[in-house]
């Protein structure tokens, strides 16, 4: 029977990064993956394919609407959706092959099949040809990730009623795309299909988009998306979809109850969030406890209720983000090896890869007010940033929230063309406990969008230069 120091179940960003770090630390490691390719949700049906389509559709829109303003004459761009999907698939393929290469390079054994914890120290792998292999191991890390959340009475067929997975492979641009849920995934995929020609209507149960994000950012972002042509129906819920006719008939009611209306759609995207995935792992029999939302219960060392069994990523509490899963993968490998791995949950950036992008790290104004923290706000709009003006990319702003007494940066929120890259500077600053003054006194290259971060830091002390 093969014997290991560590068996990782699941090869998403949590699992594969954990396996590599453990191998670096000298452990004998195996991974178990039930899907045909490595990389989990993120690489196969999440971050990577969605960013491929966001990139291609953004250029398609720019070619049609912006190039002429830059003096580039092109005829009206024609969409070749099959070729665009192929481009996206090649990006996925390159990434999943990369993970397979890294497993080989780090001498990690990869088992293809469904992993089940038969007992502490024992993982059973059921391969797709029906065979079972048993692995003996000192430690097990559960990195089984998440699955799409479903709505009662609304069967996802991945053709007309789709989850994010189906929305990444539509064979044609729907005339009318109705999205249930104004969260990150709905707005990203909504942007893709709107740019490619769909009429996109978003229904959201709450009275705002992007719950949990800074509300000023969310309001401005909604206005920008509306200007782009997306429409929103807030405080509303979808209660049924009739798929018997050529058009889907979608029943929508006010969230608080009341008269229902029926809307037509060609495709409905259910994007109401994700739920932890722990099916088939045998957790109950193994004695591994779950919380009331079905997530694996762990302590601050990612240890479950059973010695030698750990869990990370989307399968445990916390934001369902690839980089959070990766950092937990590194931390748990280091903890198992006897080192002091940890993740700072106060500094986990969050990015929406639309145009403009939205990015944040740390606390929102609402959270600071609720916690009774007094803070100063420094804000700087991209309309006053030289590079943004030169590029015709002036939408959005940088907002820095700093402690009123100590000036320590508590939160940074950005809407802007390159917000996703810019937020990394804020994360590093916060990780080092920077004050707004520290950012303000750091020389930023000119002309870049990052100067808006410096100016927002200056604005905390009411001394922005270009405003
Ligand atoms: C459309 C979309 C876009 C996204 N975009 C972003 C983004 O831009 N940035 C970001 O940070 N996050 C994004 N996410 C979220 C991100 O994909 C997840 O947070 C991340 O993949 C979680 O990593 P994980 O390792 O915990 O689990 P997963 O990536 O879900 O991987 C879990 C793996 O475990 C395997 N598995 C499960 N059970 C078993 C078993 N019993 N035996 C063997 N294998 C098993 C699964 O097959 C899977 O491969 C996106 C998600 C979606 C759906």
Image: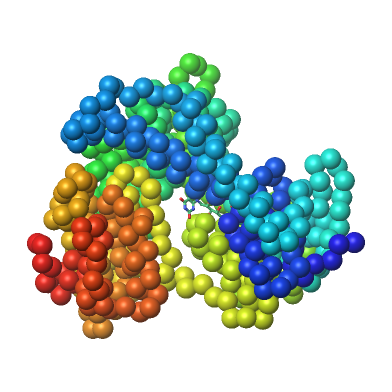
Q: Where is the N terminus found, in terms of image quarters?
A: bottom right
Name the one closer to the observer, 87 or 190. 87
Q: Is residue 137 above or below residue 9?
A: below
Picture coordinates of residue 287, whole percent (x, y): 76, 66
The quarter of the picture where residue 302 lies is bottom right
Q: Count every numbered label the image shows and give the total.
A: 0
The residue located at (34%, 36%) in the rendering is: 59
The residue located at (28%, 28%) in the rendering is: 64
The residue located at (41%, 48%) in the rendering is: 184
Q: Is residue 23 left or right of residue 350?
A: right
Q: Is residue 321 visible?
A: yes
Q: Is residue 277 visible?
A: no
Q: Is residue 151 above or below residue 345?
A: above
How does the figure colour the protein chain or chains? rainbow
Question: Looking at this rendering, what residue extends furthest in the right direction?
Answer: 1
The residue located at (52%, 31%) in the rendering is: 86
Question: Looking at this rendering, what residue extends furthest in the bottom direction?
Answer: 405
Picture coordinates of residue 460, whole percent (x, y): 18, 72
Name the one closer to the observer, 85 or 366. 85
Q: Is residue 29 left or right of residue 213?
A: right
The quarter of the picture where residue 178 lies is top left
Question: Looking at this rendering, what residue extends furthest in the top direction?
Answer: 246
Q: Where is the C terminus found, in terms of image quarters?
A: bottom left
Q: Is residue 149 above or below residue 60?
A: below
Name the one closer to the observer, 423 or 185. 423
Picture coordinates of residue 274, whole percent (x, y): 53, 49
Picture coordinates of residue 48, whole percent (x, y): 50, 46
């Amino acid at each position: 029977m093969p014997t290991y120091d560590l068996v990782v179940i699941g090869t998403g960003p949590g699992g594969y990064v954990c396996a590599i770090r453990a191998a670096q630390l000298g452990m004998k490691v195996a991974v178990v993956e039930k899907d045909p390719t490595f990389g989990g949700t993120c690489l196969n049906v999440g971050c990577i394919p969605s960013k491929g389509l966001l990139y291609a559709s953004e250029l398609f829109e720019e070619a049609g609407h912006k190039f002429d303003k830059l003096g580039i004459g092109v005829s009206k761009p024609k969409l070749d959706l099959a070729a665009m999907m192929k481009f996206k698939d090649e990006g996925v393929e390159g990434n999943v092959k990369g993970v397979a290469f890294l497993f080989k390079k780090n001498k990690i054994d990869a088992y293809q099949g469904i992993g089940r914890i038969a007992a502490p120290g024992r993982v059973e792998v059921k391969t797709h040809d029906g065979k079972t292999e048993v692995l003996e191991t000192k430690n097990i890390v559960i990195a089984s990730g998440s699955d799409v959340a479903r709505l009662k009475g609304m069967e996802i067929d991945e053709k007309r009623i789709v989850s994010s997975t189906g929305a990444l492979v539509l064979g044609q641009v729907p005339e009318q795309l109705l999205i249930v849920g104004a969260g990150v995934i709905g707005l990203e995929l909504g942007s893709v299909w709107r740019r490619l020609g769909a009429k996109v209507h978003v229904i959201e149960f709450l009275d705002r988009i992007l719950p949990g994000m800074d509300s000023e950012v969310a309001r401005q972002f909604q206005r920008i998306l509306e200007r782009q042509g997306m429409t929103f129906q807030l405080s509303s819920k979808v209660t049924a979809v009739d798929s018997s006719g050529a058009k889907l008939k979608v029943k929508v009611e006010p969230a608080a109850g009341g008269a229902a209306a029926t809307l037509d759609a060609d495709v409905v995207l259910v994007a109401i969030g994700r739920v932890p995935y722990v099916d088939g792992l045998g957790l109950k029999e193994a004695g591994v406890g779950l919380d009331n939302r079905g997530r694996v219960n762990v302590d601050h060392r990612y240890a479950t209720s059973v010695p030698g069994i750990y869990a990370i990523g989307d399968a445990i509490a916390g934001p369902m983000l690839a980089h959070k899963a990766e950092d937990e993968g590194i931390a748990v490998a280091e903890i198992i090896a006897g080192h002091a791995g940890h993740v700072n949950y106060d500094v986990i950036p969050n990015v929406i890869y639309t145009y403009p992008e939205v990015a944040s790290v740390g606390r929102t104004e609402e959270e600071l007010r609720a916690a009774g923290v007094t803070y100063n706000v420094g804000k700087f709009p991209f309309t006053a940033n030289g590079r943004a003006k030169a590029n015709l990319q002036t939408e959005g702003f940088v907002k820095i929230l700093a402690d009123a007494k100590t000036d320590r940066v508590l939160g940074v929120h950005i809407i802007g063309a390159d917000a996703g890259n810019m937020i990394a500077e804020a994360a590093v600053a916060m990780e080092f406990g920077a004050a707004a003054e520290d950012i303000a006194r750091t020389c930023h290259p000119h002309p870049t969008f990052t100067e808006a971060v410096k100016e927002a830091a200056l604005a905390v002390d009411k001394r922005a230069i270009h405003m």
